[in-house]
Amino acid sequence: MEYENLLDDPSADPFEIARHAAERIAELTGAERHDIALTLGSGWGSAADLLGETTHSIPAYEVPGFSKPALEGHVGTLRSILLPDGRRALVIGARTHYYEGHGVRRVVHSVRTAAATGASVMILTNGAGGIKEHWSPGTPVLISDHINLTADSPLEGATFVDLTDLYSSRLRGVARSIDPGLDDGVYVQFRGPHYETPAEVQMAKAIGGHICGMSTALEAIAARQSGMEILGMSLITNLAAGIQQTPLSHEEVIEAGRAAEARISRLLADIVHAL
């Protein structure tokens, strides 16, 4: 059955709902805790098959606070994977995007749930537009920092969280030990769902951005609030508007993800195994 979404009730405690979700995941998987969590965005989905043994795959809507995905390319499942060294990974294929209009609590619920399962590392991936002209479609890049242009935050009330080294330099070092050629950049989260205009892309570039997307930043803030260490990675699916001269489309994003999927999935799996 699909659970009523208690996160829509402003009087509800989102961390309590995350704890209930974690308890339900433990019940459905038989795993008392998970050690690492991954949100797999466009193009990254096949990494789950390379991590280890998938012992359980759960429709996300069977877990409190989750709903069915709204976008092609997101599978709507939670997978519990036994890694070769005995650790557990929780793979989240049920991302709620800010542009869906469900509120920030639901956007970051998966991250808070992952923390409640015991995960200390949160890996956030996405497909995004690149501003650096030497990036070609299919290029994976590390997120070194972000600029949040949603004018929103997952933090509620007088909650002050330090975002210095939000995207862990230690984890980026591990990633570069697997692929020394990985470039990095500052991720800019726009509200969406429309793509950025060329002028907005130039604004992002002027304020220090290198990657344009519609996810990740709010999730990273929530992960830091929950005490997690964060690795962010973007698959450059296209050059951003005005950098690329042809019109942008979601089909282009999906196709670029498919073309790069085998290579970037192997890369991500190798990074996880090295953590």
Image (cartoon, helix red, strand yellow):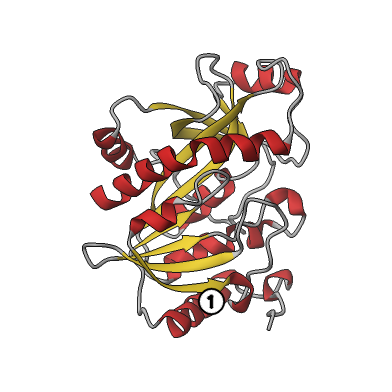
Judging by the rendered image, the residue that carries numbered circle 1 is 21
Give the mark count.
1
Position of residue 157 in the picture relative to residue 32 (left or right):
right
At 72% from the left and 79% from the top, the residue drawn is 4
Question: Does residue 275 appear in the picture of this structure?
Answer: no
Q: Nearer the viewer, residue 88 or 108?
A: 88
**Label 1 crowd (10 A; few <14 / some 14-19 / many >=20):** many
Percent from the top left, x then y, of residue 23? 47, 81
The quadrant of the picture occupied by the N terminus is bottom right
At 56% from the left and 66% from the top, the residue drawn is 77
Percent from the top left, x then y, of residue 36? 36, 60
Percent from the top left, x then y, of residue 141? 44, 31
- Classify residue 101 by image quadrant: bottom right
Position of residue 237 in the picture relative to residue 121 (left or right):
right
Question: Does residue 150 appear in the picture of this structure?
Answer: yes
Could you say whether the residue bearing mark 1 is in a helix, strand or loop?
helix
- Tell me: residue 141, above or below residue 93: above
At 27% from the left and 36% from the top, the residue drawn is 178
- Tell me: residue 188, above or below residue 75: above
Q: Nearer the viewer, residue 254 or 12?
A: 254
- Classify residue 231 by image quadrant: top left
Percent from the top left, x then y, of residue 98? 69, 50
- Identified by mark 1, the residue type is Ala
- Classify residue 213 by image quadrant: top right
Q: Nearer the viewer, residue 40 or 48?
A: 48
Q: Nearer the viewer, residue 133 or 12?
A: 133
